[in-house]
């Protein structure tokens, strides 16, 4: 049996840890389960949302996208997301209301 996640669907994942780092603000370490997470994507994580400003891989390097099964630090959250929360990528559509 071969298990693969499609990199072409909107990204979904789980937060492993969250913290506030000086100079970066709230960040969350997440594991991408499905889809590809990209810089500039809009995500929702519990009561918090983000337009991803940066993705940092496990080696401390900035990357532009994170395919499935990749652990990344997400920079740009509106607050410190709790652990075990799911993240979900949302595509902004013209005329859709923005989270407040």
Image: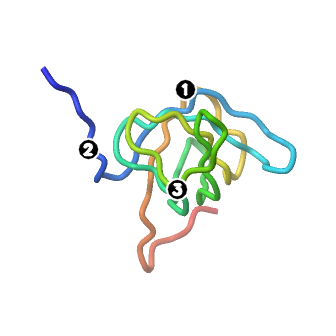
Question: Is residue 77 or residue 57 the one in the foreground?
Answer: 57
User: In the rendered structure, are the residues bearing label 3 and label 2 in contact, judged by CB atoms less than 8 Å apart?
Assistant: no
- Return the mark for residue 64: 3
Residue 60: % across, % down: 67, 39
User: In the rendered structure, are the residues bearing label 2 and label 1 in contact, judged by CB atoms less than 8 Å apart?
Assistant: no
Q: Is label 1 in a helix, a strand or a loop?
A: loop
How busy is the neighbourhood of tag 1: few (under 14 within 10 Å), some, or many (20 plus)?
few
Which quarter of the picture shows residue 30? Answer: top right
Residue 65: % across, % down: 48, 52
| Pointer 2 residue | 6
Residue at the image position 63 percent from the left and 44 percent from the top: 61
Q: Earlier in the sequence, mark 2 or mark 1?
A: 2
Q: Quadrant of the N terminus?
A: top left
Residue 72: % across, % down: 56, 39
Residue at the image position 49 percent from the left and 33 percent from the top: 31
Question: Is residue 98 or residue 52 the one in the foreground?
Answer: 52
In this rendering, which labeled residue sits more in front, label 3 or label 1? Answer: 3
Residue 14: % across, % down: 49, 32
Q: Earlier in the sequence, mark 3 or mark 1?
A: 3
In this rendering, which labeled residue sits more in front, label 2 or label 1? Answer: 2
Which quarter of the picture shows residue 18? Answer: top right
In this rendering, which labeled residue sits more in front, label 3 or label 2? Answer: 3
Residue at the image position 62 percent from the left and 35 percent from the top: 59
Task: Estimate the spatial distance between the alpha carbons at disc 3 and disc 2, rounded to whole Å.
Answer: 18 Å
Q: Is residue 41 left or right of residue 68?
A: right
Q: Is label 2 in a helix, a strand or a loop?
A: loop
Residue at the image position 40 percent from the left and 48 percent from the top: 11
How busy is the neighbourhood of tag 3: few (under 14 within 10 Å), some, or many (20 plus)?
few
How busy is the neighbourhood of tag 2: few (under 14 within 10 Å), some, or many (20 plus)?
some
| Pointer 1 residue | 84
Q: Quadrant of the C terminus?
A: bottom right
């Amino acid at each position: 049996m071969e298990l693969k996640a499609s990199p072409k669907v909107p990204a979904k994942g789980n937060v492993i840890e969250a913290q506030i780092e000086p100079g970066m603000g709230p960040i969350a370490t997440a594991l991408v389960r499905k889809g590809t997470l990209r810089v500039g994507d809009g995500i929702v994580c519990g009561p918090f949302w983000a337009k991803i400003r940066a993705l940092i891989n496990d080696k401390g390097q900035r990357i532009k996208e994170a395919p499935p099964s990749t652990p990344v630090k997400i920079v740009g959250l509106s607050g410190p997301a709790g652990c075990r929360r799911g993240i979900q990528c949302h595509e902004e559509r013209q005329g859709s209301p923005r989270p407040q």
